[in-house]
């Protein structure tokens, strides 16, 4: 794995147990965020819904209005929800470094904590849009450099599309393959032409081009 590949995964605790969440060390937030999202999905999807949608306070009917229940009034369903709220918070606490723990510890729900990390490391919606515009331009202008190794070129390209994916901007596999083939230097052109003629863009993946 080249230096650029190693940098791509900086900020993510590696070699850890699959029973523990990926550890965020304060760098490469986008990659940690995606791995954390997948980890939560695979562990307990209900916890992801808690983080994404927020909490619902158990309520009861009192006359014409509804009021929050006391803990002693919780039924089995309420208790399950409250347990999931606590599990989601605990999962985030276990996945961040001490500095980020201090940043989110003042929040009271898992959603507030997740949103706080997003704003801290990705910025507001306006900042994210600016990042998307910048990365989209990098994608559109992408070209293989003269004398560049094919693996190094793929590493550069992967970083751009991964950064865009983390910001919810995606391309189809067909678009990505076509972009790579059009970005090659002349010495790789014959291979690109062979793919166009014999396989077709729709029948090859990005990894299949390596």
Image (spheres, rainbow, N blue to C red):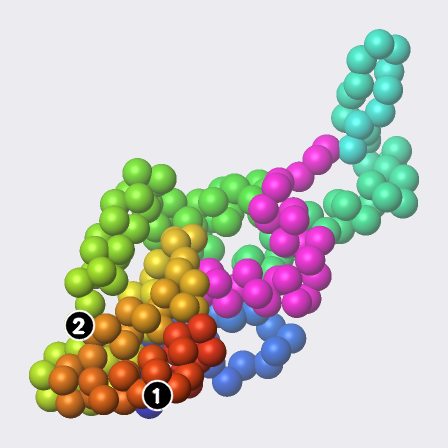
The number of numbered badges drawn on the structure is 2
Residue 105 placement (x, y as % from top left): 50, 48
Q: Is residue 28 visible?
A: no
Q: Which residues are magenta?
A: 29-57
| 97 relative to 203, above or below | above
Q: Residues within 10 Å of mark 1 (few under 14, many from 20)?
A: few
Q: Residues within 10 Å of mark 2 (few under 14, many from 20)?
A: some
| Residue occupying image coordinates x 34% and y 50% | 122
Residue 87 left/right relative to 30 = right
Residue 90 visible within the image: yes
Q: Is residue 109 above or below residue 163?
A: above
Taking the image as shown, residue 46 lies to the left or right of residue 14, namely right
Residue at 27%, 84% (x, y): give it: 193
In-front residue for pair 17/170: 170
**Would residue 203 be counted in the magenta stretch?**
no
Quadrant position of the N terminus in the picture? bottom left
| Residue 210, label in figure | 1
- The numbered disc on residue 143 is 2
């Amino acid at each position: 794995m080249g230096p650029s590949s190693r940098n791509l995964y900086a900020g993510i605790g590696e070699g850890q147990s699959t029973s523990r969440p990926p550890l965020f060390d304060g760098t490469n937030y986008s990659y940690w965020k995606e791995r954390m999202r997948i980890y939560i999905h695979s562990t307990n999807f209900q916890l992801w819904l808690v983080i994404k949608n927020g909490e619902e306070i158990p309520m009861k009917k009192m006359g014409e209005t509804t009021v929050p229940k006391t803990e002693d009034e919780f039924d089995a369903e309420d208790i399950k929800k409250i347990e999931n709220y606590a599990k989601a918070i605990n999962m985030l606490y276990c996945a961040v470094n001490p500095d980020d723990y201090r940043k989110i510890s003042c929040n009271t729900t898992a959603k507030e904590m997740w949103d706080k990390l997003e704003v801290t490391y990705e910025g507001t919606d306006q900042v994210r849009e600016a990042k998307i515009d910048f990365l989209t331009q990098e994608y559109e202008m992408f070209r293989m450099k003269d004398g560049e190794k094919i693996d190094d070129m793929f590493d550069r390209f992967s970083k751009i599309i991964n950064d865009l994916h983390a910001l919810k901007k995606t391309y189809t596999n067909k678009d990505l393959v076509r972009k790579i083939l059009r970005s090659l230097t002349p010495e790789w052109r014959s291979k690109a032409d062979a793919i166009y003629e014999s396989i077709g863009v729709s029948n090859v993946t990005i990894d299949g081009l390596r």
